[in-house]
Image (tube, helix red, strand yellow):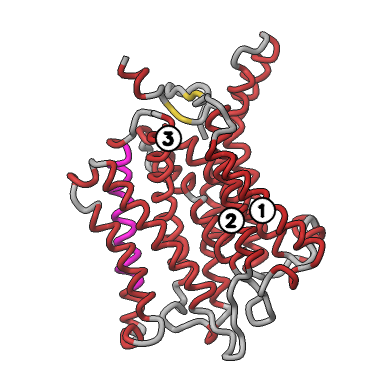
Amino acid sequence: MTSHAHSFAHAPVGGPLMTRPMRILLAFVALGAAAMVWRFAAGLGAVSNLSDGYPWGIWIAFDVVVGTALGCGGYAVALLVYVLNRGHYHPLVRPAVLTSLLGYGLAVLAVAIDLGRPWELWKVPVFFWRWSGSPQLEVALCVAAYVLVLLVEFTPAILEKIAVGAPAGRRARAERWLARLDRSLPFVLALGLLLPTMHQSSLGTMMLLAGPRLDPLWFTPWLPFLFLVSALVMGYGIVVLEATFSASAFGRRRETPMLARLSKVAAGVALFWVLFRLGDVALSGKLGLILSGLGALFLLELALHGGAAAILATAARRAQAVWQLRAGLLMILGGTLYRIDTYLVAFRPGEHWRYTPALPELAITLGIVALEVAIYLWAVKRLPILAGAPAGRQEA
């Protein structure tokens, strides 16, 4: 969590909201909203290709399984800032918390769209006497709780916005709440580290239930651990992507030296994932399967993660923004492919079952992604999210 007491200045970017990119994003949001209305009016069968064989599709595999991993930027940076006491990463925290809040918040929206009776969703946390040992239940509870934690972590940005230029009474109230949030920091941070660890590993546990219906190259008792490490890799990737994007789009100072230190850690995590995944397949006697079936996708997953680690292996490339961005994109693509493969491509419920996302499914997914980007643009322009002043102002 960031604090008003910290020495790192945050300020809104400012500027007009209804730019051409924003209008394009809102057009996609409107398209997705129209498909969403149709889904609730006509039912799941009218807008999706879901079936008894494929009870989850792109909404779960991408919007939730991939989306929450992309939302782990706050989780990954928090490990460095608070657990490893690397205070020089602190300027990355607030943007990472924002992307995490958007990723997880809109994942909850995707779940509500996917559920057959979304109006019953409120019963999940309330009717605790009906809880079971299901990994889906753990994911649902942890994701919902983590959204609340992220809202608390994001509250200082809102309070600081309220305090700027406000009358003395309102400013004093905002300062008191900021102080209270600072005192709650240890408890909030503990939850913020525990909850993603639980539900990201549980996303892997869910696919253990598939048993022989999951391709042997992806089925392993280590699925929970692999999903957790994958979330860290993708979290680092999205932090690099967000920092590079914000610097380029808004004329901010580039955090290249800071990202270079972060990239060194990320490279080690990505390389560890490759070696662990390859070693698990080798020790379980499945190496021969790489030459048949879905082996090409398995090798592509390793190549994307390994390519990111190779790019960042030398200090010279870690110090260059363009190589940082390339490695970050490879981490995101590699983790996305691994999760899509596990939940959809490598999942084989039977020869007579097929699944291809329907156009309304894709429209809703595209609308959710566009909404996330649109909210991010609004937030950084109107709330104190990004650290430091624009590059030109700092140079002056």
Question: For mark 3, does the 10 Å Cα neighbourhood hold few (<14), some (14 to 19), or many (20 or more) residues?
Answer: few
Q: With 391 as the anchor, is 23 left or right in this view?
A: right
Inter-mark Cα distance, 1 to 2:
9 Å
Residue under pointer 1: 31
Q: What are the residue bounds of the magenta stretch? A: 258-277
Q: Quadrant of residue 177?
A: top right
User: Which residue is found at the position 48% from the left and 37% from the top?
Assistant: 95
Please state which of residues 44 and 313 is positioned toward the viewer in this rendering: 44
Mark 1 in CB contact with mark 2 (< 8 angstroms): yes
Looking at the image, is mark 3 or mark 2 earlier in the sequence?
3
Q: Position of residue 36 (x, y in %)?
A: 72, 57
Q: Position of residue 106 (x, y in %)?
A: 63, 51
Q: Amino acid at mark 1?
A: Leu
Q: Amino acid at mark 3?
A: Ala
Judge whether residue 97 is colored magenta. no
User: Which residue is found at the position 28% from the left and 63% from the top?
Assistant: 306
User: Which residue is found at the position 64% from the left and 49% from the top?
Assistant: 29
Residue under pointer 3: 249
Q: Position of residue 275 (x, y in %)?
A: 30, 68
Q: With 248 as the anchor, is 129 left or right in this view?
A: right
Inter-mark Cα distance, 3 to 2:
22 Å
Inter-mark Cα distance, 3 to 1:
25 Å
Is residue 250 positioned above or below 135 on the image? above
On the question of residue 187 being in view, the answer is no
Choose mark 3 or mark 1, whichever is in front: 1
Looking at the image, is mark 3 or mark 1 earlier in the sequence?
1
Please state which of residues 1 and 345 is positioned toward the viewer in this rendering: 345
On the question of residue 238 being in view, the answer is yes
Q: Amino acid at mark 2?
A: Leu
Question: For mark 2, does the 10 Å Cα neighbourhood hold few (<14), some (14 to 19), or many (20 or more) residues?
Answer: some
